[in-house]
Image (cartoon, grey):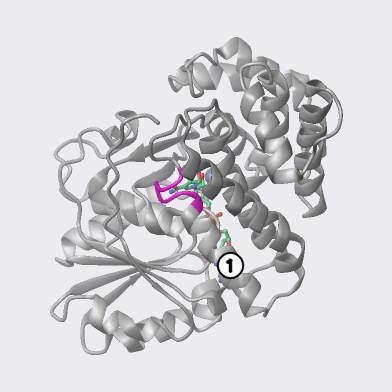
Amino acid sequence: MINFNFYNPTRIVFGQETIKQLDALVPVDARVLLLFGGESARRNGTLDEVKQALGQRVVQEFGGIEPNPSYETLMRAVAQVRDQKLDFLLAVGGGSVIDGTKFVAAAIDYPNDPWEILETYGRHVQTAMPFGSVLTLPATGSEMNKASVITRQSTQAKLPFASERVYPRFSVLDPTKTYTLPARQIANGVVDAYVHIMEQYLTYPVDGMVQDRFAEGLLQTLIEIGPKVVTETTDYTLRANLMWAATLALNGLIGAGVPQDWSTHMIGHELTAEFGIDHARTLAVVLPANLLVRRQAKQAKLLQYAERVWGIRDGSDDERIETAIEKTRAFFESLGLPTRLAAYDIDASAIDGLVARLEQHGMTALGERQDVTPADSRRILERSL
Ligand code: NZQ
Ligand code: ZN
């Protein structure tokens, strides 16, 4: 196992009827900015419930944070916090709203142009405004991690940053708040969480026995509940298990002490930036191709994945690996996520541009061994067609 330093200060408040606990979680004298997305949180009553729980506190609203939150929109929230002298942020939404809130928190006292936070991947963030979240979409793990992904609309750059300063103080996870999600978003959530686990698990063995077993357990849970959680909109058990699995998939636990890949994500971000494809849908396309292209470097873990996650024991090494990748692809497809770029009318002519953007964004040494070059990314994209 690789040496590690594990830290996660986010308090999780999980279960039904937990929004009322905001009263105890948010400082009594806080001047709060509520950040949310389109109208879903208002329409399904979550926003009202949150406001009621906040009681007599000063509460202002900032709506309109879009999926794949934009720097341009978020800078207006930064201005509102400064003008109105607000001092606590509360995100109500999915990954986009929570990521956006992390950026706002870090930007408020940032000494330079806040876009630099993205250009330097968060390395120079010294302070951030305290914030919490009320999660309405299980997928990204943003509710319990230090990462955020922001898009600059003017240049279509979608870049990640991370900082220990932007862990949420707390996140309220009420699975019943997911009942209003369209099936497409739930399916996206299952796949995003699945690929988060794969990015930390499917690398090379370092004898992280606990991390491997935890990762395999989470993957198997997603395989078990995936098809049902998409159609059963009000099944508490399914929604609760999806929510907790998605949080644990990316809160640092399974990634501590093991190598991490993330190349599927970085290639996927370019597809979202260029073509507007939902985040998880880019991953469903890139992951199977990535595993095929890099099967040699990942051989030992692919064989472990085949046996322990999918129960594949028959056939040669190559056959077992191929079957495991095919089963992964079939799982994504069964949830309604295509696994080929052709489904989005994207053909080989797009690849030059995508590879150029990866280079422009410094994504030239990706993967668990930093050996995924632009030429490899090209091969992965070609395999995704
Ligand atoms: O905007 P509203 O009207 O609220 O609608 C949202 C949005 O259209 C809707 N929604 C959310 N909760 C709902 C609901 N609709 C009905 N009922 C509810 N309870 O769902 C739509 C998608 O929301 P979004 O927040 O964009 O989805 P998701 O949670 O999948 O977040 C995606 C973003 O997270 C980033 C992605 O790149 C993308 O920008 N990621 C963040 C990560 C992190 N911080 O660690 C890691 C991930 O890999 C990912 O990159
Ligand atoms: Zn993701």
Placement of 113 over or under 92, stated as above or below: above
Residue 352 appears in view:
no
Name the amino acid, label 1. Answer: Asn
Disc 1 crowd, CA 10 A, few/some/many (<14, 14-19, 20+): some
Q: How many marks?
A: 1
- The span picked out in magenta is 249-254
Q: Which residue is mark 1?
A: 241
Near-viewer residue (301 or 122) = 301
Q: Tell me which corner region of the image, top left, top right, bottom left or bottom right, holds residue 88.
A: bottom left
Percent coordinates x, y for residue 95 in the rendering: 48, 56
Which part of the image, by quadrant, shows the C terminus?
A: top right
Q: In screen coordinates, is 310 left or right of 159?
A: right
Circle 1 SS class: helix
Near-viewer residue (59 or 89) = 89
The residue at 51%/29% (across/down) is: 261
Q: Tell me which corner region of the image, top left, top right, bottom left or bottom right, holds residue 131.
A: bottom left
The residue at 34%/47% (across/down) is: 146
Q: Main secondary structure of the magenta part?
A: loop
Q: Tell me which corner region of the image, top left, top right, bottom left or bottom right, holds residue 297.
A: top right
The residue at 61%/56% (across/down) is: 189
